[in-house]
Amino acid sequence: MFYQPSRAHLRTLAHALCIAPTVFSAPLYAQETPDVQTQIKQIQASLGQIKSDYEQRIAVLEQQVQQLKQQNQQLAQRTQPSVSTLPIAEAKTLAAPTKTQQRLAKAAAIENSITAVAPPPAAAASTPLPNLGGQNRSVELGAELFIDAKYSAQSQNPQNAYAGVLPNGAEGVPRGFSIGETELSLKGAVDNLFRAEARFVLEQEGNSTALKTEELYAETLGLPGGTKLKAGKYWSNVGYLNDKHPHEWDFVDLPLVYKQVFGGQLNETGAQLSWLAPTDNMLFKLGGEIAQGSNGYTGTYNSNYNQNKPRLGTLFAKTGGDIGDAHSWQGGVSWVRATTGNSSANQASYDLTNTAGNTINTLNFNGGNTTWIADFVYRWAPFGNPKAQNFKLQGEMFWNKQSGSMTSNFDCGDAGQCVQGSNFAQNQQGFYTQGIYQFIPNWRFGYRYDRVFNGTNSYGLPTAALTNSQIQSGWNPVRNTIMMDWANSEYSLIRLQLARDNAFGPGVYNNALYLQYIMSLGAHSSHKY
């Protein structure tokens, strides 16, 4: 049975509204100003209008309720056969509420909602936001703040360049206390066709800090056929670790091969087109990017600012799937090509340093890089639930070839006496593999092995131009790293890491200890696979 308010209740509300004007019509003070009288008259007029509107609505509802009651009584008086004696189909039809009963229930619900609580005056009503995405859609802007701080003790100066190849601009973790990389992320749907994301980074540079734009892009939503277009500044989708933000890493720093080939991570300004196959049980994704080719890491690629010709392109393919309830995997292959062009204005510059970190020579390069990457990830969690236990095995292999011509500023009396190089060729291969095991809730242990093979490189320069520099042909650095971290929740993590490497040259070992915390504020979106 539905609740139906009596006429007495409805009349009580109407009488209350009638009494209100008389209350407000009494003098508030012994002496009133004309402005107060005007305001009182306006309030009286507003209350009178509200009273008139509600009386009209109540009268209409009373009439509808009476009509529905009469119709319901007429239907009840009709002789109906017993439900138990009818066929199943007819019994189901009679057991369901009739349209008249449904209308009666709806009218009663509307009446209850109106008479239960009177709405606020129109002046107090909030103004809704403009509808940007279609009917019944709200626009939300998600904000995340990741705070990263570290302490490190290292036996070698992390500002020195690695031995074996041309310097790449990779930044090491400074010794002592540092703020690491604090990241602010803003993201959300623009409308029904686009979403946007912006990430700003506050990081330490020497004794000062700098605010940088890490990502700033827009991408499409709902394009047909599983395609997506992204444009702006973003981490490239090549490899596995390249598009992961520092707070997503399982170790304090990047693998050696990322530092030596890309000078960190490949972060470019350009456009990306990707396609995700509409499969049920398998992941299959293809994509490509075209970018300006000026990623800001000195010496990795050239500076191509304010030029019409983008000089970096990528292609990538990824596939993966589940094996039962407890296992999943993902593999991929990527290709990166970057060139400086033939103009001397576009050449990349490399500063050669000695063991003390002092610049002794400058090399200018014109040519290109071609890099292939193969990556693989395997995950295990009992019954697919990683809360208590899980394991991740991850690895990537790089093949990098750089070729072109080299010019040296070594021993220049004037511009005409500089040593000119030719037939420059540098080949690198490198890989890392790591395993992360969460043995009990909130606690993880991990091990990583890094190796880079620099091979025998031809710089096309006399030996004197490279003497006493970090260039050591055939030097293959190796690093071993262990870590343990504890996460009180998905918003806080404390990590201890120990590492030992010989990346700075033969017989030069770097023993490093790192202590890190990562804290996040705001809505924390799930990490990528």
Image (tube, rainbow, N blue to C red):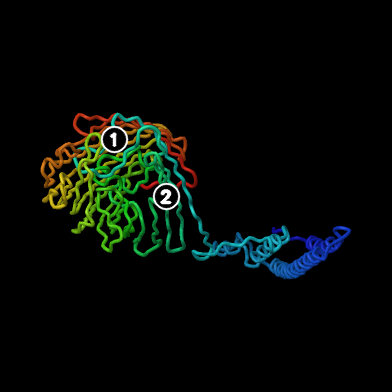
In front: mark 2 or mark 1? Answer: 2
**Where does the image place residue 5, in percent across and percent down from the top left?**
75, 60
Mark 2, residue position: 200
Q: Is residue 130 left or right of residue 444?
A: right
- Asked which quadrant contains residue 466, the reply is top left
Residue 66 visible somewhere in the drawing = no
Helix, strand or loop for disc 1? strand
Q: Position of residue 399 (x, y in %)?
A: 19, 46
Q: Position of residue 389 (x, y in %)?
A: 39, 35
Return the residue found at the far front: 413
Judge the density around disc 1: few (<14), some (14-19), many (≥20) Cα neighbours within 10 Å.
Answer: many
Crowding at dot 2, Cα within 10 Å, few <14 / some 14-19 / many 20+, comes out as: some
Is residue 342 positioned above or below 201 on the image? below
Which residue is tagged 1? 448
Q: Looking at the picture, which amino acid does disc 2 mark?
A: Phe
* Mark 2, secondary structure of its residue: strand
Give me the residue at 43% from left, 59% from top.
195
